[in-house]
Every structure is written in structure tokens, then in C-alpha cells.
Image (cartoon, grey):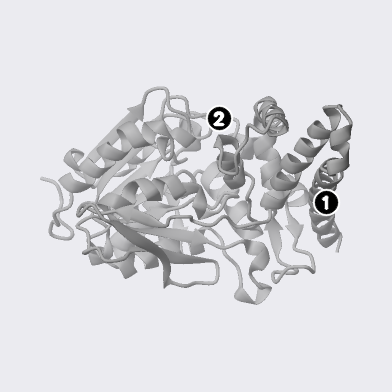
Amino acid sequence: MRYMLTYDLMETLRNTNQWAGASAQAIASYPMWGMVPNPAFNLMAAWGEVTERSFSRMVSKPDWGLESVVGKDGRDHIVTVTNAVERPFGDLIHFKVQGRAPMARRILLVAPMSGHYATLLRSTVQSLLPDADVWITDWHNARDIPVSAGKFDIEDYTLYLSDFMDHLGPDLHVIAVCQPAPLALAATAYLAAEKPKAQPRTLTLIGGPIDPDANATDVTDFGRRVTMGQLEQVMLQRVGFKYAGVGRMVYPGLLQLASFVSMNAETHSKAFYDQIMRVSKNEDGDRDKHNRFYDEYLAVMDMTAEFYMSTVERIFKNREIAENAFVVNGRAVDIGSIDNVAVKIVEGEKDDISAPGQCLAALDLLTGLPDSKKAAHLEPGAGHYGIFAGKSWRSNIRPLVLNFIDANAKAEPVGKKSA
């Protein structure tokens, strides 16, 4: 019960801050204060507005907000989000472009399940839609999943990915961003052994911890600094009575958010101070740069305890992917069995989450893949976010990935080995 109380206490603190912000804004916005020539009321109202918006976003799932895309015919085509596959812990969703013929490129984006919703990749989806049919993994907030749905760990995650790939067929190009990179690699290897014809044409891995020890960062080295027992006692909480997942043990999104913010506390503090000043001077906008970023950044979701713990233990501590010793559903997954899926690695030179070298380690594991089907790109000056959603992605990486997809779109006989 103490875990439930802790979970509800954390949510109570969030709710209280939201209420305090809304109250401050309402009180300081009384028209009568216009008779008092004191900027304190404007500052108080601005603080309240920014605070209320920030804390309310922490429990709201952002909308995709993709209304239309311009086709090659020059017309706007409406985009609708539909569920292609529905599962208890995550769906496969399709961005259906109305009135447009099927595209030659069919892309599955594997979104991270590391505290944020799949909408974190909104700009990535938006940049790919004009040139491809796009699907994405939409992971669910663990607090909303009843305990009766069972467990969900990294093996279940890998099986979900393999099922999604199988559902979409072999003429598929998979792009995995950050956290799911090692599991997308494992899912492809799993298919190579179990359903060779279901393997995708290409696999692009962007800034993921294939081998966390290749170039450790504060984030990837975290698992080394604590024991599993300490993680279980400090990080895990049990969902309170307010939600459908009552009783489920989770790693709370709010706790994850606190960790994110603490890593760059000075930067975030300045960003919020500057926004308060802008609001007080009526220089802000509902979708200005600050709000666009933080509406997404602050929207967090809970992860199942077993997924969080198995990720730390098996990916970071035991390095099962890096050692090619990963097991799924009782079957050993041999990454070397991938022999006809072209693999591209993308890393950012200044990535402080998954540093250069961590993702590149995948190429050494692909012993059955000819060098002609391996590619790597290190983006100069790019940080973690930039390699999949920022300027570096739009200007340099996206064209490279699409060219890689096109160059390897033609199918080869399944099981063909390099000479």
C-alpha cells in the first residue's frame, strides 16, 4: 500500500501545482487590477499561466495534429490516424492519406517507450508522410492498463515488434529511434529464424544503445551505478485507485520526467523564466517555440515495472544484445542470422544520451550480412533530439535514410548468404 500512497502523493503534488497556477492566473487577471500601475500582477498572472499549462500537460496524451499532407498532384490530402493492430500494451497505427495512391515506400517507425508518448516523433512522421506510407508503434500508458492484461517486458516488446513487421509484410522499411533500437534488431533476428519471409527490406537504427559500454554516458551508465534492488525500492510505485491500472507496479512517468529535468535543470529553469517574461509582455503564442516543445516534453507516461527492470538488467547491465546472448520466448536470438536485411546506423556527434559508438556496435554483430548491406552515418554537431526530429534530421539525415531505403528496396532471395 505504501507504493500506492506514494504514487497518489506524487499525482497530488502535480495537481496542486496545476491548481496553484490556475488560481494565480485567475486572481491576478481581475480587470480591477488595471487601476494599479504595478507589474507584479502581470508577472503573477504570467507565472500562473505557464505553471498551469506545464503541470496540466503532464497527464495529457498529445494529439498527433497531422491534418493534411501535400501530394505530388499539388493537392492537400487529409490524414487520418487509424489502428492497424490493437494490443493491450500498444497499437500499430497507420497514418492514412486520403485520396492518395499507395506509395512505394512503406515505413514502420518504432517509437521509444522511455517515458514519452509516440507523438514525440510527430515531426519525424510529418517529414516522411509526403514520400511514404507510414505506420508507428503507439505504446500505451501503463497506468491505464488493467492488471488482468498481464505483464509486459522487453521480450513481449520484441514479440510485439515482430508481429507488427509480420502484419505489414516483407516490403517494409523499419526505422527504430533510440530506446527500441536493440529490440528492433532482436525482433528482426527473431523473424530471420522463425519467419524469414516476414523480415523487412531495411532496418535503420537511430541513436540507440546497442552496446551501452561502447561509449558510456550518464544515462546509459546509470544501470551500473545502482543495484537492481535499489531500483526496485526507489523507482517503482504501484498505480493508485484513480486509474484503470490500479495495483500495477510501474516506473512512473512523473518520476522519469523529474530525472529528465534534473539532467539539464539550469537550461529548463531559464526556458521557463524566459517564457514567463514573454507571457507578461504578451509576446507569447499558444503554439510558440516554447509551448510546442514543452507540451510534448512534459507529457509523460508510466512504463510497466517489468519492462523498466528488464531493460536495465538485460540491455544495460548484462548487455545481452551487445553480447548476442538475447533470448525471446525461450529461443536464443542470433543477430548473425540476419543475412539479407540492409542495416543503416545513424548517430549524432554530440549525442549525450546514446553517444557515438553505442549504436554503431550493431554492425559488428551482423556477421551474416555482407558489407554492401551495411551503412553508417555520424551527423556532425547533432545532439540526440536532432538526429530524428531536428534540423539535422530534416536537412541531412532524412534524405540519406530515404536514399538508403530506395537503394535496398528490391527483394533478394530469403536466406541468401554473401559470397
Is residue 360 something that shows in the picture?
no
- Counting residues from the N terminus, which is met first, the one under dot 1 or under dot 2? 1
Location of the C terminus (image quadrant) = top left
Residue 304 shown left or right of residue 215 in the figure: right
Picture coordinates of residue 392, whole percent (x, y): 38, 31
Which numbered dot is residue 217? 2
Q: Residue furthest bottom?
A: 148
The residue shown at (49%, 46%) is: 179
Q: Nearer the viewer, residue 338 or 41?
A: 41
Say what secondary structure mark 2 lies in.
loop
Query: Which residue was labeled with disc 1?
Result: 19
Is 219 drawn above or below residue 150 in the view shown?
above
Is 22 drawn above or below residue 331 in the view shown?
above
Q: Nearer the viewer, residue 212 or 46?
A: 46
Q: Amino acid at mark 2?
A: Thr
Closer mark to the observer between disc 1 and disc 2: 1
Picture coordinates of residue 228, whole percent (x, y): 68, 47
The residue shown at (50%, 72%) is: 87
Badge 1 crowding class, 10 Å Cα cut-off, few under 14, some 14 to 19, many 20 or more, is some
The residue shown at (32%, 32%) is: 395
Q: Amino acid at mark 1?
A: Trp
Picture coordinates of residue 307, whole percent (x, y): 59, 57
